[in-house]
Amino acid sequence: MTTRGVVLGLVLVLAVASAAAAAFTGRDVIAKAKDARECGKDTKSAYRMVLTSKRGDAVKRTLVTYWKKYGDDSKSIVFFREPEDVAGTGLLVWSAKGRDDDQWLYLPDLGRVRQINASARGDSFMGTDFSYADLGDTDVDERTHQLLGEEEMEGQPTYKVESVPKDATTYSKVITWVSRETFLSVRVDYYDMGGALLKTGYFRDVRKVKGIPQAFAIEMENVQTGHRTQLSLLEIDCDSGLDDDLFTERQLKRGP
Amino acid sequence: MAARVLILALTGLTVVRTAAATEVRLGETRVKLSGSLAAWHVFRLDPDTPSERPSSTLDTKLEGDPAPHFHLFLETRLGYDGKIGDPDRGNPVLDLDEIYQDKDLFVSFEEAYLDLLFRRFELRLGKQKVSWGRLDELQPTDNLNPEDLTEFFFRPELERKIGVPGAALTAYLGPWTAEAVWNPVYTAYRFPNREDRWFPPLLTVPERVATPFGAVPVRTRYPDVDEPPHTLASSDAGLRFRRRIGSAEVSASVFHGWDKTATFSARGTATVVPTGDPAVPAAPSIDLTVFPTLHRITVVGGDLAVPVWVLALRAEAAWIHGRFFPILIRDQVGNDPRLIAAVAEAAARVAQSGRPETVTLPLTAAERRREALEYGIGFDYAMNEAVSRRLTGGESLAGSFVMVQLIERVMFDHDAPFIAQSVEHLLGLTLRQTFRDDRLLAEIKIAYNPNHGDFFLWPQLGYKLTSNLHALLEARVLGGDGTHPIGQYRDYDGIRIGLKRFF
C-alpha cells in the first residue's frame, strides 16, 4: 500500500467516525446517558451524604437505597442509618409513568407509616441540593435536547447537550457534559426559571461495577446559595435480584 | 438526689463526645446497640401550681438478627422522674398493673419482643407497642396500648404508649393485610400521683368543705386499681384488615378489651363523733375514696388515607360500645341534699346516744355508660418550592409542614351532668419547619375545643448542637374552662429546657 493510500484510508476512517459521532443527536446522547446510569434492573447502594452550608457548617448522613425497575415504572426505598437521631427514617416511593408518585414516610418516633403527598419532582430531596427529579427516573422526552458540540471537561472528552423542559417549572434549561467514553454525566449545569445558573453537579471517581461504570463521588453545588451536597457511594450492587417485598410498607417499618 | 442525678446526666451529655451506636456483624448475625441520654427541667409559670424537679432518662435499644427470620428488640429506660412528689425507693422496676407509679428512680422495659419474619406472615411475641389508625395523637381505633398520662399530652405519641405483653400476627394475603393482636394480661395506664404536678384538679377534693354543719374535714384516698384476674375474659383482642384500593389505603378493625381511658368512681363514709358540746353535739368528718374503674369495651371502626390534589388526607371513625363517661362530682360533697340528710340523721343519733357512728355516703355515680361514636378527618400539606417562591420570592418556606385535624365524639343519650357535651369537637393544628440544613427544628402543636374554649399550645424548638447532641426548648400553654379536661390545667403553663444526646 502506498503512503497516499494509507493517508486516504485514515481520512476515510476519520470521516466515517466523524459521521458516526455527528449522527448522535442531543436526544441520543441523553438517552444513552440515562441507560448508562442504570445499574441493571435493580440496585442496592449506600451513600454518605455531607451537606455543607455557605458558612461551612456540615451535616453528615448515611443512607441506604434500593431501586427496582418495573417496565416504565420503578420503586425505590431509602433508609437513613446515621446520624442516630434520624436512623430508621424511611421513604418509599412508587413511581409510575404519567402520574404522580405514591410516597410513604416512616418516622421511628411516630411508630406508624404515613402516606404523604408526593413531593414536587423539582423539590429538594431531603434537604439536599439534589431534586427528586435529579435522583429519580426522568423521561428523556420530557425535555428537548440539542447537541452543542464536543468539549473537554474535567480532563475527559465529552458531548455537550442543552436540554429544555417542555413543561418547565423548576429549570429553564439544563446543560450536560456526557463522557464520550462511558456516557456517564461528567458535569451538569441547572438554570433557574430566570435563566441564571442555579446549581452545578460533578460526577467523579468513576469505577466499574459488574462492568457498568458508576460515579462514586457526586457533588452538587447551589451557586446561588453557596450550599453544597457531596454524595460518596460507599457500596453498590446491581442486578442482585431484589425482592418485590422490599418495596412495601412493612419493609419501611422493619428497616434495611 | 435530684441535683446529683442532674449533674451526672449533664456530664454524660456534654463530656462523652465520641459515643456512637455500636453495630457488630458476625456472619448472618447482626447486633446493634443505640440509645439516648436526656436531661431536662420544667419551670412553672404559676408558683401556686405543683412544681417538679429536674428529670433525666437513659434509653437503650438493643436489636439483633440472631438467625434468619428472627429479630430481637429490647428497649429499656432508666431514669430519674422529677415529677414524683412523694417517691418510693423500693423496687425501681415499673409495675405493669399499677396506675399510680411513685418511683422517682425507675427502670422500665419499654418493649421486649421477638419477631419471626416470613414472606407471608410475621409473628411478634413479647412486650410491644401497636399503632393502629391514621389520625394524629388520638386514634379512635387504636386501643391496644394504654398511655402514660403523667405529663398530660406533652410527650410524643409513641413515648406515651406503654408496651403490652402480647402476640401480634400479621398475614399478607395478596392485596390484603390481616393483623390479629392478643394481649393476655391487663396493663394499666399511668396516671400522676396526688402529689405530682399533673394530677387533675378535677379529681382533687378540697381538704375541708363548707356544709350546713360548718367546715367539715375531708380525707381523700386514691388507691390503685384492683388488677383483674388473669383469665381469657380479661384479655384484649383486636383484628384489623387493610388493603390498598388505587391510591387509597383503607382498613377495618374490631377491638374488644379494657378501655384505656382514665375513668374514676368514688365511695365515701362520714364518721360522726360526739363533741360533748351542747351547742355542737356532733362533728362529722368525711373519708372519700376515689378509685380508678376498669371497663370492657368493643370498638368497631376503620380508617382511610389517600393523597388528594396536593394534600394527604386521613380519616378514621369508630363505634365504641361499653365506654363510661365521667360526671362532675367534685362539688357534691358539701352540697348534695341526700348526703347532707344522711349526715344530719347520723349526727342526730350520735347526739342522742353519745356514741360515734360511721355511715356510708350515698354518692351519685361518678360515671355512666353510654354508646359513642368517634370520628375524625385531617389533612397534611408539605409546601413545595414553587409555592414558597410564589409566597416569599424564595425557597425559605419549602418543606414547611402543616397538619390540620378535626376529631368529634358523639355521646348518645346525653341525659346526665356529664363533663363532656353530647358532641365534643377537638381541632388540632401542627406547623413544622426546619432551618439551617435541618439543624433547627421549630414545631407548634395547637389543640382547641370550641365546646368549652379549652386549648393548649405546645411550641417546641430543637437545635442540633452537633449531629448527636440536641438542645430542646418548649413552652406549654393551657387555657379554658376549669371544669373540663384541658381547661382544668389552665394555670399549669410552663417552660421546659433540656439536652439530649444520641448514641
Image (cartoon, rainbow, N blue to C red):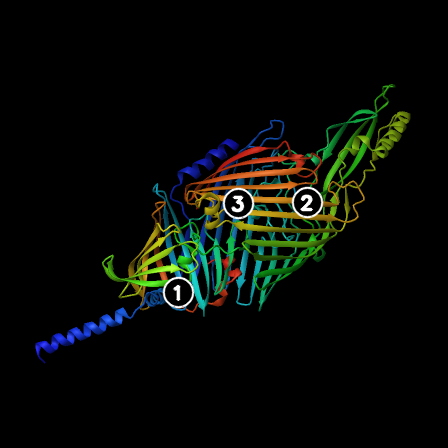
Which picture quadrant has residue B336? top right
Point out residue B55 in the picture as x, y percentages from the top left corner.
53, 36
* Label annotation for residue B315: none
Task: Measure how far apart labels 1 and 3 are at the Cα level.
Answer: 53 Å
In the rendered view, does B391 fall on the left or right side of B265? Answer: left
> Pointer 2: residues within 10 angstroms few (<14), some, or many (20+)?
some
Task: Measure how far apart labels 1 and 2 are at the Cα level.
Answer: 51 Å
In the rendered view, does B110 fall on the left or right side of B7? Answer: right
In the rendered view, does B81 fall on the left or right side of B394? Answer: right
Task: Measure how far apart labels 2 and 3 are at the Cα level.
Answer: 35 Å
Residue linked to disc 2: B425
Residue linked to disc 3: B77
Disc 3, SS: strand
Point out residue B255 in the picture as x, y percentages from the top left corner.
68, 57
Q: Nearer the viewer, mark 1 or mark 3?
A: 1
Residues marked 1 and 3, same chain: no
Point out residue B450 in the picture as x, y percentages from the top left corner.
68, 40
Residue linked to disc 1: A140
Most foreground residue, B222 or B416? B416
Marks 1,3: beta carbons within 8 A: no
Mark 3 residue type: Arg
Most foreground residue, B159 or B233? B159
